[in-house]
Image (cartoon, grey):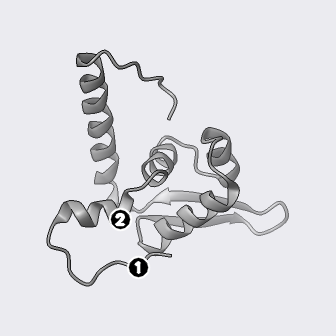
Amino acid sequence: MVNFEKEYKCALVFTHDLIGGKWKLRILWHIIHGDNRFSMLKKAIPDITEKVLYTQLRDLQKSGIIEKEIVNEQPPKTILYHLREEYKDLEKIIEDTCRFTKYYASCNNIYIKETV
């Protein structure tokens, strides 16, 4: 459940509450790169449980970062998740963060697999 403070002393602390934690950035990265169905996300992030994935998607929806689109009501129901248009800048921020992290890793002899 998303429970934000009414006031933050630092934007970085709010950023952590908004998209921080173990899963949210990984989920957002995959949504941005086309893994936008629940089953695709679960396959792309195999170490996340279905319950946690569901909770994280719900929290991202409640905070307004992503939206859920029901494409097909008939069984099997098709639901897609998208980054909301007004937050498309987050895509560049995530990409820039990944680019910095790869650079940092290469400078410090840290190996990063390309899977997220």
On screen, residue 110 versus residue 70, left or right, reads left
Q: Amino acid at mark 1?
A: Asn
Q: Is residue 24 above or below residue 94?
A: below
Q: Picture coordinates of residue 85 (x, y %)?
A: 37, 61
On screen, residue 73 versus residue 112, left or right, reads right
Q: Picture coordinates of residue 28 (x, y %)?
A: 46, 51
- In this orientation, which residue lies closer to the viewer: 86 or 64? 64
Dividing the picture into quadrants, the one containing residue 112 is top left
Q: Picture coordinates of residue 70 (x, y %)?
A: 66, 67
Q: Is residue 4 above or below residue 43?
A: below
Q: Residue furthest bottom?
A: 6
> Who's the residue at 35% across and 20% down the image?
110
On screen, residue 12 versus residue 116, left or right, reads left
> Who's the residue at 66% across and 54% down the image?
38
Q: Picture coordinates of residue 68 (x, y %)?
A: 57, 66
Q: Amino acid at mark 2?
A: Leu
> Who's the residue at 27% across and 46% down the image?
93
Residue of label 2: 18
Residue at disc 2, secondary structure: helix
Pointers 2 and 1 in contact (C-beta within 8 Å): no
Q: Which mark is residue 3?
A: 1
Label 2 vs label 1: CA separation?
10 Å
Circle nearer the N terminus (2, 1): 1
Q: Could you tell me how many numbered marks the image carries?
A: 2
Residue at disc 1, secondary structure: loop
Dividing the picture into quadrants, the one containing residue 43 is top right
Q: Residue furthest left?
A: 9
Other-residue count near label 1 (Cα within 10 Å), few / some / many at <14 / 14–19 / ≥20? few
Other-residue count near label 2 (Cα within 10 Å), few / some / many at <14 / 14–19 / ≥20? some
